[in-house]
Amino acid sequence: MKKSLLWITTASLFLIPIFPLLVAKSFFFPFITGKAFYFRILVEIAFASWLILACFDAKYRPRFNQLTVTITLFTLIALLADVLGVNPVRSIYSNFERMEGWLAIIHLWAFYIVATSTFSASPSPKQLWYRWFNVSIVVATIVAIYGLVQLSGNAEIHQGSRVDASLGNAAYMAVYMLMHVALTAYMFFVARAKQILNAGFLQWLYPILSVVFAFVLFETATRGTTLGLFGGIMLACAIYAVCAKKEAKRSRWMAVGAIALVVVVGIVFWANRNSSFVKNHEVLNRLGSISWNNTSGQARQYIWPMAVKGALQRPVLGWGQENFNYIFNKDYNPKMWTQEQWFDRAHNVFLDWLVAAGIVGFLAYLALYVFLLISLWKSDLSIAQKSVLTGLVAGYAVHNIFVFDNLASYVFFFALLGFVNTLTHHHKTTSKIGLWIQNKTFSKDAVEYVAAPIVIVALAAGLYFLNVRAIQANTRLITALTACTNQSGKADPGLFAQALNVSPMANQEIREQLLSCTGNVIGGPYPGPTKQGFFDLVKQEIQAQIAWAPQDARMYVLGGMLMSNLNQIADATQLLEKAHVLTPRKQAVSIQLATTYIAAGKNDEAIALLKDAYESDPTYDDAKGAYIIGLIIVGREAEAHKLFDPSPVFETQRAARAYISIKKFDKAIAIFKKLIAADAQSVDLRVALAQTYYAAGMTWSAIDTMRALEKDHPEFKDQIEAAIKDIEKNPK
């Protein structure tokens, strides 16, 4: 039985590095969810088999040394912060988009415990880890080849022009490649020291792969990770140059030369960042645009102070994981109108942990790095090997300053923690708990007839409630969305109802997709009962989501926008007013609420909101345009005209529509004529002019406009003739 348990445990561990290859196309968020479920299921199987094995044999039990205690405390602190946070369910379960939260942390801890305990009990722990690393390197090679195929134009890039391969996100791809640049460099020194089989061949292969991985990393155009790569290389070389034995003079000078090369290349590149060669190369141009003044840099300028301010509001244990959105909405900076409106990360892992788990969790997270490096430098690895791994830790830390973690980086960080712990596993356990775990004996019968059944039942429960149910919710959501979006007329609110409440992690995303589908159905060619069914369900689920997360502005905003589009003004107003309270500085919310106020006849309240949205950042043209249009609609044109500039915002179709809504057709017609003079080939503008003529009762002008359009665009003859017939049948 012991052999079988050991085989299951080891096999599960060695299957884990394969996860980057998985893309679950039938899942919601296919690049995220499939990988995460695969990892979790394997860890749960490995942990269960290991736990029974450890009951049989004490040598498979963990040693509670510095590193293990630190990781365990970090995991427990994260749990405490999540439970005491503002939304414990979200903190623990996360969602399909991220698949993180405390469930991810506890699985990473379990992976670390099982790997270190199992590998350390082997006669050759290092060799097992080297085999595990090699499996990961093989997988990384496949992923890198996929990225190269994307570059060649023979495979789709899922994120613009930035290589993402099977990771689906350039930043995720970048940190995955970063890990393997360092891993192959480390294995080169292992091969050079003849510590593995086929060392001669691998000594040449590893450097080649390292260069390939670095090139693919570069093509992801992820600036923070690229900085981490170069920073890690320089630190590794500097450490080696200082600490290597004097007899390794040549190697030390090579390290110094590498540092000099990186510095020179960096200076030359930066000096020529505005050259045509750099500007015309998409990746180089992106890397050369590293600045606090570009869009990405500005976002961090605004977000990082928000994160610090939010952390100070709950300084001890923070807000709980997955709750940065509360801070983002509450302390939103109006200058962020150029960015996405729903940040859920600070784009800095250290700040993310400061927000999620307060100063206690932040220090615990820092302690992972500190004790990792302490344990690493206490090990018997060579100076070269220690230097490379230290450079990896530094590069990863730099990456985490500018981006955020994901499964691809988390797994390999915890693998590194596990590997280093294995190097010091022989250190004696001194704690009472550790000694009790090491010395406790169990009878064979107790293990086989008590412990094993309990573990197996717990495993089955974990697999079902943590994975199977979540997978069911995910696939049911896909079924509901497919029926809604394939134009088959088979959209069914019952499909969404079936997907809801299957798993706690899924409900918010299902409800948001329900809102989107409801808008399409009610505005589409569906029968009345179907439309009513969607409407009733969406109203119910909006309230259910609000009850679940009453301080989260997101559902109030999305629900309010949907109700406004469906002309449910009273419901829209109620939702958007609450949203405005929760995120008072977000212009988009103010503009949407103002729109509902105008529909409800609350003109003064609407104008006050629009004015505030405009004045919060006058460079925001949409806010300025909305303010001008609002003034026009409520009859305060003189105030609107004071805001006109040489390139007037009012000369847009929105402004023309505003004039149409208050039946000032002459002004709308004047705007459309001016727009057409600037863009005579625009079919849409000329159709809009004809429609305005028709609305104004100027039937013959409408027909003349359509005839002129037909002359210039004979390809639309049939549609234009049909429109003219409709006008002639129903003249105004």
Image (cartoon, rainbow, N blue to C red):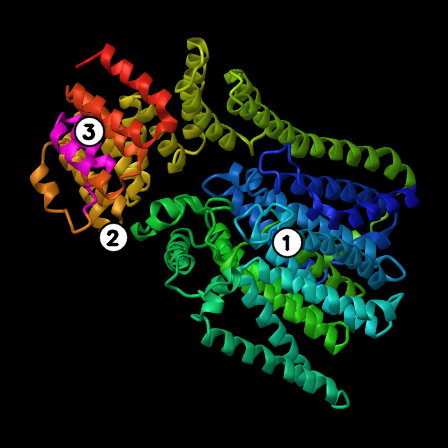
Q: Element at badge 3? A: helix
Residue on which the image places disc 2: 619
Give the quadrant of the N terminus.
top right
Asked which quadrant contains residue 461, the reply is top right
Q: Nearer the viewer, mark 3 or mark 1?
A: 1
Q: Is residue 449 left or right of residue 87?
A: right
What is the magenta range? Answer: 648-673
Q: Check whether the beta carbons of the residues at disc 3 and disc 1 lie within 8 A of each other.
A: no
Q: Element at badge 1? A: loop
Q: Residue at x 66, y 65 (%)?
A: 372
Residue closer to the observer: 456 or 273? 273
Residue 410 can be seen in this image: no
Marks 3/1: CA–CA distance: 53 Å
In the rendered structure, find residue 598 and report the number of the disc placed on it: 3
Residue 527 can be seen in this image: yes
* Disc 3 residue type (three-letter): Ile
Q: Check whether the beta carbons of the residues at disc 2 and disc 3 lie within 8 A of each other.
A: no
In the rendered structure, find residue 152 and report the number of the disc placed on it: 1
Label located before the other in sequence (3 or 1): 1
Label located before the other in sequence (1 or 2): 1
Q: Position of residue 414 (x, y in %)?
A: 68, 56
Q: Is residue 632 left or right of residue 676?
A: left
Q: Position of residue 11 (x, y in %)?
A: 83, 46
Label located before the other in sequence (2 or 3): 3
* Disc 1 residue type (three-letter): Ser
Q: Residues within 10 Å of mark 3 (few under 14, many from 20)?
A: some
Q: Position of residue 595 (x, y in %)?
A: 24, 31
In the rendered structure, find residue 321 and report the number of the disc placed on it: none
Tell me if residue 2 comes above or below residue 371 in the rendering: above
Residue closer to the observer: 139 or 39? 139
Q: Residues within 10 Å of mark 1 (few under 14, many from 20)?
A: few
